Amino acid sequence: MKWLPEIGVKTSKKSLRSLRHTFANELKQAGVNDQEASELLGHASQGITYGRYGKDYRIDILYNGLSKIEFILK
């Protein structure tokens, strides 16, 4: 990922992991529930009920969660 420094995502003070941490925090602050946030972050579903038997969230539900946050690029 040589292009990350070029777009300002990877510097001596931040990395791609920082972006993921920020994204998770913004979802939490916006009140997005844990299950939706986990799916948006690419984490595995927890628990047997949803992990084994539940399907992924529909795209409209995930979009609703994403629409709750606003990033301001500096």
Image: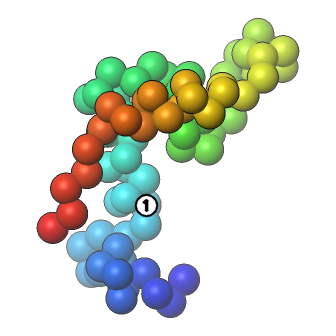
Q: Please, which residue is most extreme toward the top here?
A: 49
User: In this view of the protein, which residue sits in the foreground, 68 or 29?
Assistant: 68
Q: Based on the displayed image, in which of its 4 quarters is residue 27 positioned? A: top left
Q: Is residue 46 visible?
A: yes
**Residue 17 percent across, percent down from the top left:** 43, 60
Q: Residue at x 24, y 73 (%)?
A: 13
Q: Is residue 37 visible?
A: no
Quarter of the picture containing the N terminus is bottom right
Q: Nearer the viewer, residue 55 or 1?
A: 55
Q: Position of residue 38 (x, y in %)?
A: 55, 33
Q: Residues within 10 Å of mark 1 (few under 14, many from 20)?
A: few
Q: Number of callouts in the render?
A: 1
Name above or below for residue 9 compared with residue 37: below
Residue 35 placement, left or right of 52? left
Q: For the C terminus, which image quadrant?
A: bottom left
- Asked which secondary structure carries label 1, the reply is helix
Name the residue that disc number 1 marks. 17
| Residue kind at label 1, given as amino acid type | Arg
Residue farthest to the left, as pictured: 74
Q: Is residue 50 above or below residue 29?
A: above
Instruction: Give above or below for 34 relative to 9.
Output: above
Colouring rule applied to residues: rainbow
Give the residue furthest to the front.
60
Quarter residue 11 falls in: bottom left
* Residue depicted at x 46% and y 87%: 3
At a point 30% along the width and 70% down the height, the residue shown is 14
**As drawn, is 47 to the left or to the right of 7?**
right
The quadrant where residue 49 appears: top right
Q: Is residue 57 above or below residue 11?
A: above
Where is residue 23 drawn, in percent x and y? 37, 47
Residue at 45% x, 28% y: name it: 64
